[in-house]
Structures are given as structure tokens and as C-alpha cells.
Amino acid sequence: MNRRDDELNELLRAVRVPERAPEYWEKFPQTVVRQLRRAEAGEAAGSRGSPGRSGGHLWAWGLGLATACLVLGFFAGFRRGHSLGFSAAELAQSRKIYHELAGLFPDQLQTVLLDGRGSQLVLASDAQPPASVPLLVQICHDGICRRFITFSGQRVALNGETFEILFDARGNVLVVGDRLAWSSGEPRKAAAGYRIRATALGEAL
Amino acid sequence: MADTDEELGWVRDSQTGDHAAFARLVSRHQRMIHALAYRMTGSLAEAEDLAQETFIAAWGQLGGFRGDASFSSWLYRIAANRCLNWRSRAARRNTVHQAWSEQRETLAPDGAPLSQQVQEAMLKLDPAQRAAIVLTVCDGLNHAEAARALGCAETTVSWRVFMARRKLKKLLASVRVRGGGA
């Protein structure tokens, strides 16, 4: 209580915002525009999204997609899973981790990042049923790999790029980023130097 | 900040659905929005997500922008509210704090420890109090402007700033400004 306001102001202004590379600032506007275009392309009516309306459509689209995944995912996922590219040991280990964490945080688990040092969790603030069966996804690029247990509709990141994970009615896991759209139904179609493996964990849960 | 004719032209074009014009607006204001989001979250990754959410929300609301306030103020208001909503997702806190502790090692060494201590103290504030401090002290808004951005009364902002200062003084009691300047 002995610090003068001016000195406190000076301290607060000393907080530095880490500088990003010039390329980041060059790409960011295009990243935003790509997301807008993707959202507009997804509008069922096909009407061109104009400002003032597209925001509502974007959320409605997302909500509809999540609902569809919730309904279809549970039915399709349990019946049909892809163990694409993962060994039995990897799947068993992932299921074990999922069971333990889901027991600790029932209906709150959104994403588990698995790395060599342990697990990092993203939890929902309120319990809510997941939008799909749990999905195991591994994304590799430039020699760096990240493995996640997550659900349809969640977003994960690698090397600063964000990917949306989706689970379709056929039991395929989709990974959608700015530079690629990958499906476990067509796993050989890798793009932009990415290597991806993904499968539904629900089958044997 | 007054809008330039050039910027108003980009806003008008964006309102008709011109993505290229909107990209120019994003380019002009992206640093301001990223900085606000970083100060509110302490995380580069979360700041990036919030900045994207802000601009996408702005695109969706452009039809309601009538130029009563400057475009930057209007955009800033959207970002400030996004940051507050983000913070209400309390469950992300642990992850973000973990990311922060890892990220601190990559910050510029010059001045990093002081910056880290202050940022950590900021993250311990109630989100509404933190927003009040960020807007008024870090971004230089007066209390009336901050109240408009946050959608609350000016007296509420003043009270939040007061409470935040009191807490920060305790949290930063052992920290000294080096050389009298940042």
C-alpha cells in the first residue's frame, strides 16, 4: 500500500507484448479472411454472407455442425472406428489416459495434449456432454509432432497453426486447417508437408 | 482516434462484403487487438485466437457500425468484451498459466523478469478489474472511454481501477522499476 500510483503505472506499462515475426503480421489478415470465406462457403443457403448477417450464420452453422456430430458421432463412432496408423499399444495407452482423465473431469474434458513430458488439459468450465466419441489425432510438421485426445468441434494447434477436428457421420476424423483439409477416410492425401494420423477411440471404450 | 477517409472507405467496402477491404482494416488494427488480448490473457496463442474471434465478430457486426465512434474504438470495444468473455471460461486458466510459465523462457531477456512478474500479477486480478487496468493504464483510455468499451458505468470503471491498484500494490510490493523507467 506504499507504492504511489505513478510508480505502479510505470510498472504496468513495462509489461512487454512479445514481438511477432513480420511474416505473422503479413499473414494474419489473410488468415482471418480465409476463415470468413470458409464460414460463408458453409452456409447452407448459399447466399453470399454480407456483414451484419454472417456472424449469426457462422455461429448457427457451428452449432448445427456440433449438434449433428453429437447425434451422428455417437452412433457411427461406436460402430466403426479407424485405428489408422496407430499401434495397439498406442491406442491402449491413449484409452487408459482418456479413462483416467474423464473420470477425474466428467463431461469437462475438451482436449488432452499428449507429449513426452505428460499431459496438458483443456477443460470446459461447465460439464456438458462431448460432441462426439473421443478422437485420437496426431499431427506432424517440420519434424514436430503433437498428439491429442479430443472431440469433434475442438481446435488444436501445431507450430502456430490451428486445426479444427471434426468427426463425420461415416466415422471419419477430419482435420481442417488453413492449408489443408484431411480425412481419415482418405489418409494418403496429406498436404502442405503435414503427416496426420487420426482415429476414433470410441470403438473399444 | 479519428478515422481517415481511406479507412472509412475500407469500412464502407467491407460493409458491402468486400473481403480485401476488410483485410486492410485487419492489417491496420491487428497489433492493437493482439496487444489487448495478450495483456488480458498472458498467452500469445490465446491472444491470436481472441484476435481472430474479434475480427470475425467485427465482420459479422459491420452492418451495425454507423460511424458514431471511430472504427478503432468500435473494434476495441468488441475485443474488450471478447477478452472478458474469454476469461469467464475459467477452465482454460490452468492451461494458459502452464503455457505462460513455458513461454516466459522465450521472452526477450532484456527486461523480461520485471515484465513477467507484472504480467503474472495482472493475471491474478479479477478479469473485470484487469480489463479496467489494461484499458486505462496500458492503453491510455480515460475512465469514460473505458466505460464505453466495457459497457458499464464510469463509476464502475473507477472502482475497478481502484480495487485493481490496491491488489497490484500488494502483489508487486517487492518489485522496483529499474532505472526509473521501463
Image (cartoon, grey):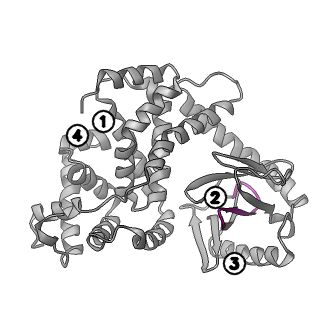
Residue that extends furthest to the right in the rendered view of this protein: A79
- Give the letter of the chain under mark 3: A
Q: Secondary structure at mark 2?
A: loop
* Circle 1 or circle 3, nearest the eye: 1
Instruction: Please provide percent x and percent y for residue A145.
Output: 67, 67
* Circle 4 or circle 2, nearest the eye: 4
Q: Which residue is mark 1?
A: B73
Instruction: Please provide percent x and percent y for residue B75.
Output: 37, 37
Answer yes or no: do the residues labelled 4 and 1 have beta carbons within 8 Å? yes
Q: Which residue is mark 2?
A: A128
Give the residue drawn at x 86%, y 76%.
Answer: A88
Give the residue drawn at x 73%, y 75%.
Answer: A99
Q: Nearer the viewer, residue B102 or B42?
A: B102
- Give the letter of the chain under mark 4: B
Type of the residue with mark 1: Ser
Q: Secondary structure at mark 3?
A: helix
Specify few, some or many for label 2: CA neighbours under 10 Å numbering under 14, 14-19, or 20 or more: few
Instruction: Please provide percent x and percent y for residue B182.
Output: 19, 63
